[in-house]
């Protein structure tokens, strides 16, 4: 068996056997997956990456577990969107060496780890954070468009979750 075949077999086993077993354990309430910290901790303890949050959300039969997974997906997506907005303000296209460690893609993006705001004024960062916060939590037509055109598609793509599940 080739190395590639072994990796594909391992990936299939994680997705088709190991992850469903973890979700079944949570559904029996043998482990608690009701908040982002317990979700991440239990996934990592089981050798699974947070990219599996979408599978957890779609396969659990417990609404609180589904809701916690979706909240974590949305929070991680919002963080990445905010990072991109800050990069755009400073003219970076490559992530600029900023550490975006959300457990997806193996952690730090780029090369050397630099503060997220390096090269951007404090006032600009504050404005971007406030604007993003208002769009994520707001109830305006701009907020709805932000969710429909930015948050939902990115969360769906990154975590393999149907957009309808994010509403």
Image (spheres, rainbow, N blue to C red):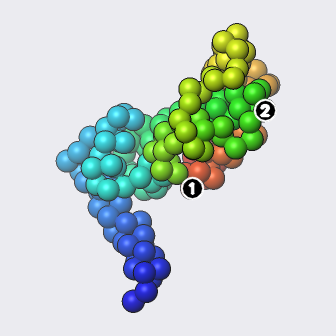
Q: Position of residue 154 (x, y in %)?
A: 66, 45
Alpha carbon separation for disc pair 2 and 1: 29 Å
For the N terminus, the quadrant is: bottom left
Residue at the location (71% across, 32% down)? 87
Q: Position of residue 73 (x, y in %)?
A: 52, 41
| Residue 146 in view | no
Q: Residues within 10 Å of mark 1 (few under 14, many from 20)?
A: some
Left or right of 96 on screen, residue 54: left
Circle nearer the viewer, 2 or 1 = 2
Mark 1 element type: loop
Q: Return the disc, 2 or 1, that comes first in the chain's sequence.
A: 2
Residue at the location (36% across, 42% down)? 40
Q: Position of residue 57 (x, y in %)?
A: 46, 49
Residue at the location (56% across, 26% down)? 115
In-front residue for pair 49/60: 49
Give above or below for 20 relative to 148: below
For the C terminus, the quadrant is: top right
Residue occupied by mark 2? 91
Residue occupied by mark 1? 160
| Residue 68 in view | yes
Give above or below for 107 relative to 136: below
């Amino acid at each position: 068996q080739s190395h590639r075949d072994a990796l594909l077999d391992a990936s299939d086993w994680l997705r088709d056997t190991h992850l469903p077993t973890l979700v079944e354990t949570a559904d029996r309430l043998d482990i608690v997956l009701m908040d982002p910290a317990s979700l991440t901790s239990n996934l990592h303890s089981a050798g699974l990456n947070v990219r599996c949050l979408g599978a957890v959300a779609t396969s659990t039969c417990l609404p609180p577990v589904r809701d916690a997974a979706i909240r974590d997906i949305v929070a991680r997506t919002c963080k990445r969107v905010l990072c991109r907005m800050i990069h755009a303000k400073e003219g970076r296209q490559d992530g600029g060496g900023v550490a975006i460690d959300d457990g997806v893609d193996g952690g730090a993006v780029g090369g050397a780890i630099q503060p997220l705001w390096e090269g951007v004024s404090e006032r600009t960062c504050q404005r971007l954070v406030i604007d993003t916060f208002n769009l994520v939590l707001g109830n305006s037509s701009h907020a709805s468009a932000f969710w429909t055109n930015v948050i939902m598609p990115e969360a769906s793509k990154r975590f393999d979750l149907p957009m309808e599940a994010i509403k």
